[in-house]
Image: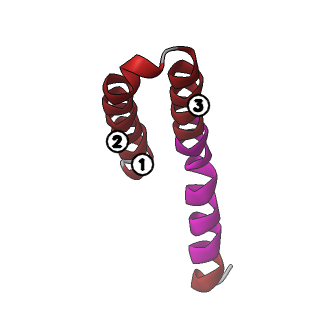
């Protein structure tokens, strides 16, 4: 197997590993929209927690 082929295989495996982070981020913002629809008065506080959750989910994806 050539070095170029192993490079592409590694890149593909890394992309597969990022799907968990993508699913987590989607779940966070889905919950944000649902919670804001239920209680619009807490929009600012919920958004702060959503951004924190986004940062943590993204950091786990980048750390791999």
CB atoms at circles 1 and 3 under 8 Å apart?
A: no
Judge the density around disc 2: few (<14), some (14-19), many (≥20) Cα neighbours within 10 Å. few
Q: Position of residue 3 (x, y in %)?
A: 57, 82
Quarter location, residue 52: top left
Q: Position of residue 23 (x, y in %)?
A: 61, 38
**Upstream in sequence: badge 2 or badge 3:** 3
Residue 43 horizontal/vertical position (percent): 40, 26
Image quadrant in which the N terminus is located: bottom right
Q: How many marks?
A: 3
**Magenta part of the chain:** 6-23
Residue under pointer 3: 27
From what the image shows, is residue 30 above or below residue 19? above
User: Could you tell which of marks 1 and 3 lies nearer the N-terminus?
Assistant: 3
- Circle 2 — which element? helix
Q: Residue at x 33, y 29 (%)?
A: 44
Write the residue at 31% across / 31% down. Answer: 48
Structural crowding at the residue carrying mark 3, measured as other residues with C-alpha within 10 Å and reported as few (<14), some (14–19) or many (≥20) = few
Please say whether residue 17 is one of the residues in the magenta stretch.
yes
At 36% from the left and 48% from the top, the residue drawn is 63
Q: In the depicted view, which residue is nearer to us: 47 or 8?
A: 47
From the image, give the main secondary structure of the stretch colored magenta. helix
Image side of residue 23 versus residue 36, left or right: right
Asked if the residue under mark 2 is in contact with the one under mark 1, i.e. CB atoms within 8 Å, the reply is: no
Q: Eyeballing the image, is 23 above or below 12?
A: above
Residue 11, compared with residue 17, is above or below; it is below
Left or right relative to 45: residue 61: right
Q: CA distance from mark 1 to mark 3?
A: 20 Å
Camera-side mark, 1 or 2: 2
Residue wearing tag 2: 55
Residue designated by label 1: 64
Magenta stretch encompasses residue 15: yes
Mark 1 vs mark 2, CA separation in Å: 15 Å
């Amino acid at each position: 197997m050539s070095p170029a082929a192993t490079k592409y295989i590694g890149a593909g495996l890394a992309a597969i590993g990022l799907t968990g982070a993508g699913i987590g981020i989607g779940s966070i913002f889905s919950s944000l929209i649902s919670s804001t629809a239920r209680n619009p008065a807490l929009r600012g506080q919920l958004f702060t927690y959503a951004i924190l959750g986004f940062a943590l989910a993204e950091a786990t994806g980048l750390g791999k």
